[in-house]
């Protein structure tokens, strides 16, 4: 079992910055990748950014150049630095982790979500 604990959401004015954190608690599984997704009211959950344990990253076009994902492997923690926030970034942000045991299947876990609200 893996628990993901998120923090760092809040209310910020347009143009401001926030940093989200997500700590994965597990001493059994290896983390293959971690990422951030978001869901705005009335919309489907969408990918924001992901990073593999090899350092490969992927960003939604809407956040490229403004958001940066990073993983601290020693702490099993993924961060999302969000700069130049826009009102359309308002959403609940969810952390996701892909984990596995050596030579075992991959499992996915989700965090509880953290609200990000950007005022105009």
Image: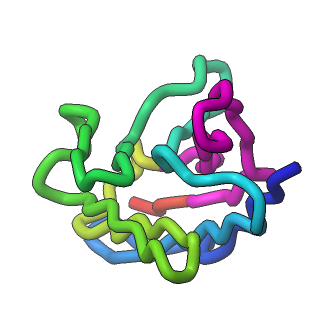
* Residue at 45%, 69% in the rendered image: 79
Image x and y of residue 49, in percent? 36, 44
Judged by its main secondary structure, the magenta piece is: strand
Q: Is residue 101 above or below residue 82?
A: above
Residue nearest the observer in this picture, 81 or 52? 52
* Residue at 50%, 49% in the rendered image: 34
Taking the view exactly as shown, the residue that stands out farthest to the left is 65
Image x and y of residue 6, in percent? 69, 67
Total tally of numbered discs in the picture: 0
Residue nearest the observer in this picture, 60 or 14? 60
* Residue at 23%, 65% in the rendered image: 84
25 left or right of 14?
right
Is 99 contained in the magenta span? yes
Taking the view exactly as shown, the residue that stands out farthest to the front is 103
Taking the view exactly as shown, the residue that stands out farthest to the right is 1
Image x and y of residue 90, in percent? 51, 49
Q: Is residue 83 above or below residue 114?
A: below
Q: Which residues are magenta?
A: 90-116
Residue nearest the observer in this picture, 88 or 93? 93
Image x and y of residue 33, in percent? 46, 45
* Residue at 62%, 72% in the rendered image: 10
Q: Is residue 108 visible?
A: yes
| Picture quadrant of residue 66 | bottom left
80 left or right of 104?
left
Q: Is residue 35 visible?
A: no
Is 80 contained in the magenta span? no
């Amino acid at each position: 079992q893996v628990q993901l604990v998120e923090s760092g959401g809040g209310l910020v004015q347009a143009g401001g910055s926030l940093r989200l954190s997500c700590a994965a608690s597990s001493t059994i599984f290896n983390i293959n990748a971690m990422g951030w997704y978001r869901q705005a009211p009335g919309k489907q959950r969408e990918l924001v950014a992901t990073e593999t344990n090899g350092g490969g990253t992927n960003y939604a076009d809407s956040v490229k150049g403004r958001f940066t994902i990073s993983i601290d492997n020693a702490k099993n923690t993924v961060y999302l630095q969000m700069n130049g926030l826009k009102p359309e970034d308002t959403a609940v942000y969810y952390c996701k982790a892909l984990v596995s045991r050596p030579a075992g299947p991959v499992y996915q876990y989700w965090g509880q979500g953290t609200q990000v609200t950007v005022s105009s």
